Amino acid sequence: MALDVMYSPSPLVVDGVTMWHLAPEQDPDFDPMDWVKFLGDALTYRWQQARIYDEYYRGEHRLWMGAPSQAHVVYRRLLAESRSNWAELIVDAVNERLRVVGFRWAGSGDETADLDVWDSLWQANNLDARSDEIHVEALVWGEAYAITWPDDLGNVQITAEHPTECITYAPAADRHQTSMGFKRWCDDVGFWHCNLYTPVAVYKFSSDSAQGPGGSPPYGSWSPRAVDGEPWPLPNPFGVVPMVNFPNNPRLLTGGRSELSGGAIEMMDRINETVFNRMVAAQFSAFRQKWISGMEIPRDPDTGQPVEPFRAAVDRLWMTENPDARFGEFGEASLGNYLSAAEADISHLASISRTPAYYLLPRGQMPSGEALRAADYGLVKKVQRRQRFFGEAWEQLMRTALLMSGNLAKAQDQSCETIWMDAEQKNTGQIADMLIKLAQIGTPKEALWELSGMFSPQQIARMKQQAADEELAKAQLAATFQPTPPAPAPPGQPIPGGPAPAQKPA
């Protein structure tokens, strides 16, 4: 299929990226280079369209030019100082409440977390930290990825992947079934590499020459990349694409979306511009400017140009012997309107992004109790929606990793559930009161630990073990110090601690 002449009458969405040309054929004799070009174009398009979100998250906001020549240096300095990194705050407010604490398989009849999977897959691949990176990139770019594959020793490796280097494809017939995965990257010496993942094989390519990270990937000069001990292409015995997509807040046809899309960038630009105008006013208009009339302006005898007759300063006084001269001053610029305008835009940004106002405009004391719950309501619901989609991706990734590790029973069990730390900030006093009342009606301890939302499954497992150890120690201690019953006293002898024997009458 000629990709440069075949076009779709409507945009084709590839992993959230809008493409206007048709995908290559997915037949048994397909040419992998067609897919390298097709998915590579989609990857480049994503970088062009979404990199502004990454720039704003890093605080590299757009600046306005066209400064007056006499104020050029100051103007540019004020432009740089007027930027406020609201983007990072909006993203991190969501990310700090996205913490995976375990996985459970309800189909097995056991509602507790699977600690073996947690230790062998999650902890072994450092996913406490890598999961945080995946969530951040997905929140910023709209998509993030993970790849799982066994190493030479058979251990399943899970790696976090950046959305500018990876992309997945699902056919229009089933947009939830990934049929292709593609990774493209530039190495440390400037050569480009790419891997095309299919359910049956992995095709690896490298560029024939070094282009550097700033160059275009050389589509016309890809060659199969030979890896010692591997055939080409590398067979995929697992029957699934080993790349999993983590979409942020996706829609059916457009895939994931950045937390900074939908007008947040434009609002931040307005805020930055208002702050810049306030700084300019403070720099040039906050000082009361003087004026004079009825006086002839002196001129330079050499150049004939007007010369400023007075210099305004705190320690300078203006004087003239001209009786017709009149002095006065202009009022200074008020900065209150700038502050009010900036605060209004910040409030709009908080509403649109559902970020609590106390994050963006902290005033007075931190809200607590019901006020905190009401202020956090929008953010909590937003985080819970992100947890649903990210949770499905983590479950798919765990099932794929279990398939590669040989655990077919759990790999095929669709009841896998991601366990998240509670997204809601709760008052500890209210939690304690609730738990006490539940304990009074006979709620088991383990259920109380889970309901509190304060403990991870791993902590609960340790607490259960500690409780069992304490009960065992108490039983052993009771057996050790069990008092022995006193031996019966001989006839006629008093029983220790008992009444004295009766005396016979004389």
Image (cartoon, helix red, strand yellow):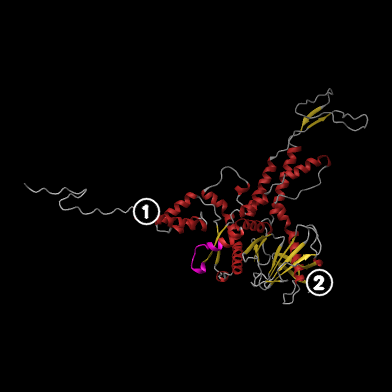
- x%, y% of residue 128? 60, 56
Residue 112 lies in the magenta-colored region: yes
**Based on the displayed image, in which of its 4 quarters is residue 322 positioned?**
top right
Tell me which segment is drawn in magenta: 106-118
**Amino acid carrying mark 2 in the image:** Val
Q: Residue furthest right?
A: 302
Q: From the viewer's perspective, is residue 268 above or below residue 318?
A: below
- x%, y% of residue 257? 67, 60
Residue corresponding to mark 2: 5
Horizontal relation, residue 341 to residue 211: left or right: left
**Residue drawn at point x = 41 percent, y = 56 percent:** 439
Point out which mark residue 477 bears. Answer: 1
**Amino acid carrying mark 1 in the image:** Leu
Identify which residue, 99 or 329, lies in the foreground: 99
SS for dot 1: helix
**Residue drawn at point x = 15 percent, y = 51 percent:** 492
Identify which residue, 17 or 377, lies in the foreground: 17
